[in-house]
Image (spheres, grey):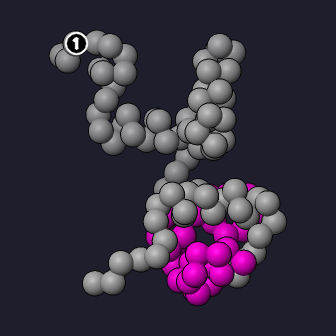
Amino acid sequence: MRQSRVNMAMLDGVPALIEQGLTKYEIAEQFGITPGSLTVMCSKRGISLRKGGRHKPSGTITLPLPISLAAMMSLRSAAVSRGGDTKRLAIDLLERIASDDLYNAVLDEEAA
C-alpha cells in the first residue's frame, strides 16, 4: 500500500486553513494531492471543508453544561496553547474519558 503524503498533523490544520479563507483546491495544492483526495480524507476524519470547521458526527447530541469560570478559563487556555478551540478540546476530552472509561482516573477515585 502506498503511503499518503498527508499526515494527521496536516489534516488537523485544515479547519484553520479553511477559516483563513483557503479553498479545498488551494489546500489540496499545498498538500500535493487532488481536491477529491482531500475531500475523502477529511470526510473520513469528520473534518468539514466548509468555513466553520468540523462536522458534527451523526448520532451526537448537544447538552448545555454548566461549568465554573475557573474551569472555563483553564480549558480556554489549554485550547489556545494547543492551537485549537475550547469547544473542540472539551468534546475531545469528554469523548476520550467515555471511550476509554477514564472516569475513576480523572476523578481520582478508587475503582469500585
Give the residue pinned by disc 1: 110
Q: Quadrant of residue 96?
A: top left
Q: Amino acid at mark 1?
A: Glu
Residue at 53 percent across and 71 percent down: it is: 43
Q: Quadrant of residue 36?
A: bottom right
**At which x and y percent is residue 101?**
29, 34
User: Relative to 91, is 7 above or below?
Assistant: below
**At which x and y percent is residue 47?**
58, 63
Q: Nearer the viewer, residue 9 or 64?
A: 9
**At which x and y percent is residue 89?**
56, 38
Specify few, some or many for label 1: CA neighbours under 10 Å numbering under 14, 14-19, or 20 or more: few
Q: Nearer the viewer, residue 23 or 45?
A: 23
Give the residue at the far left of this rendering.
Answer: 112
Q: Quadrant of residue 112?
A: top left
Q: Is residue 13 visible?
A: yes
Residue at 46 percent across and 35 percent down: it is: 94
Label 1: element kind: loop
Q: Which residues are magenta?
A: 26-55
Q: Nearer the viewer, residue 20 or 46?
A: 20
User: Relative to 66, is 12 above or below?
Assistant: below
Q: Is residue 62 visible?
A: no
User: Relative to 51, is 6 above or below?
Assistant: below
